[in-house]
Amino acid sequence: MKSEIRGSLVSQALPPTPALALRPLIVLAEDNADFRELLATTLETIGCRVEQARTGAQLLEAVHRLADAGETVSLVITDVRMPELGGIDAARALRAIGADLPMILMTAYGNAWTRAQAAAVGATLLDKPLRIDVLRQEVRRLLGA
């Protein structure tokens, strides 16, 4: 029920956007369940498939599981501060194993250090509170749509 309401609110609050053609797979990590669900719904409305994770550790598990299943992850979106393993450390771990995929880091603490760390792993940094239209635009840019 909550996701139906959120989905309705997202579709009412934003102008329609054409769906992406290839249904890219995004792994989304955010420890706030309500915000994670809102982001997932938003991404699904533009034609993305979304695998959700609560922590950076779960993000890494999801990427490995999906790769083992023959799935191609098109994009990773992660919060910077999460329990167990934060987004920057998760991004570093992905880069260390050779994952050359686009990444978006989200933070409410966008200081110079955080920006430098995001740049070091080749990720885009978006500040919270996150504007949904900016997220959609950045996702499209990174996916080449």
Image (tube, grey):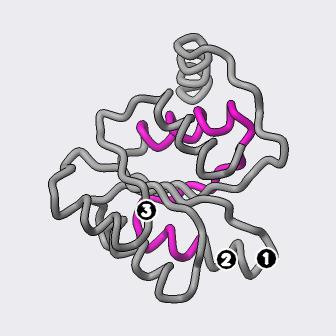
- Residue at 56% from the left image edge and 35% from the top image edge: 136
Q: Are discs 1 and 3 less than 8 Å apart at CB?
A: no
Q: Considering the numbered disc 1 on the image, is that residue within a helix, a strand or a loop?
A: loop
Task: Give the dominant element type of the magenta stretch: helix, strand or loop.
Answer: helix
Question: Gap in Å between the C-alphas at discs 2 and 3?
Answer: 22 Å
Q: Mark 2 packing: few (<14 Cα in 10 Å), some, or many (20+)?
A: few
How crowded is the residue under tag 3: few (<14 C-alpha within 10 Å), some, or many (20+)? Answer: many
User: In this figure, which residue is indicated by the disc labeled 3?
Assistant: 123
Residue drawn 53% across and 42% down? 138
Label 2 with label 3: CB-CB less than 8 Å? no
Depicted 126 relative to depicted 96: above or below: above
- How far apart are the two marked residues, 1 and 3, measured between alpha carbons? 25 Å
Amino acid type, label 2: Arg
How many other residues sit within 10 Å of disc 1, few (<14), some (14-19) or many (≥20)?
Answer: few
The residue carrying mark 1 is 69
Taking the image as drawn, is residue 31 in sight? no
Determine the residue positioned at 30% across, 42% down. 127
Q: Amino acid at mark 3?
A: Ala
The stretch of residues the image draws in magenta is 34-62
- Image disc number at residue 65: 2
3D distance between C-alphas at marks 2 and 1: 6 Å
- In front of the other: 81 or 100: 100
Furthest residue in direction bottom, as rendered: 97
The amino acid beneath tag 1 is: Ala
Does residue 72 appear to the left or right of 1 in the view shown? right
Q: Is residue 31 above or below residue 14?
A: below
Q: Position of residue 9 (x, y in %)?
A: 54, 16
Considering the image in quadrants, where does the C terminus appear? top right
Residue 85: where, in percent of width, then height? 33, 72
